[in-house]
Amino acid sequence: MPSIPPSRVLVIYFSRTGTTRRAAEMLAQASGAELCAITEKRSRLGPWGYARCLWQAALGLSPPLKPLGCEPASADCVFIGTPIWGWHLSSPVRSFARRYQGQLGRIAFFCTQGGSGSDAAFGELQRILGRPPLATLALTDAEMEDGRAAARIEAFARLVKGAAPLAGAVAGASRPLGTPARRRA
């Protein structure tokens, strides 16, 4: 009986402060995926870098990126991670999505945020990539800091891995697109 080749799973992310990077590392470990960072040609450090983040995100701009250290188009499933900047998708992840539009296999989205903006960012990613993700996961900075994110990331990885045999069909989401986040007391 021939063996089924293992699927190739990537976690691709951009992180300015390290929060999304930590989430991506946890997700890669939980899902057995390769990790691949999106990097820009220009630094975003300091106050001017922060201002540029908000400005580019709000205007829907796509900055130039350095070449990736992986090939997302050859992966069976790609987790795409972004920070939320001023209630918008980060501009480096927008650049990545525009570059790989129509080339990716199954996709799933995750983000880190201060409190809100994930619905708009996930909606924009879906529009750019032309189809819905298998699942989405929005993590707050507070969840990342106090450790609550770990269990949610594990569950997200299991959900997407369980959806993988569906050949790209939407199998559910940690929170379906368009569903408001519940406030925690």
Image: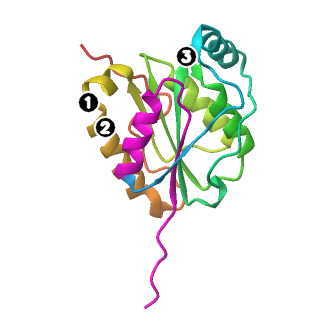
From the image, state whether disc 1 or disc 3 is nearer to you. 1
Q: Amino acid at mark 1?
A: Arg
Depth order, front residue of 172/57: 57
Q: Amino acid at mark 3?
A: Trp
Q: Earlier in the sequence, mark 3 or mark 2?
A: 3
- Image spot of residue 109 (x, y percent): 51, 39
Q: Label 2, secondary structure: give it.
A: helix
Q: What is the C-alpha distance between the residues marked 2 and 1?
A: 7 Å
Q: Quadrant of residue 25?
A: top left
- Tell me the residue at 26%/30% (across/down): 148
Q: Which residue is mark 1?
A: 148
Q: Quadrant of residue 101?
A: top right
- Image spot of residue 51 (x, y percent): 63, 9
Q: Which residue is mark 2?
A: 152
Q: Which residue is mark 3?
A: 87
Residue lying at the far bottom in this picture: please name it.
1
Q: Which residues are magenta?
A: 1-30
Q: Is residue 181 above or below residue 99?
A: above
Q: What is the C-alpha distance between the residues marked 3 and 2?
A: 22 Å
- Tell me the residue at 65%/30% (across/down): 92
Depth order, front residue of 85/168: 85
Q: Pointer 2 and pointer 1: residues touching (CB < 8 Å)? A: yes
Q: Is residue 163 above or below residue 87?
A: below
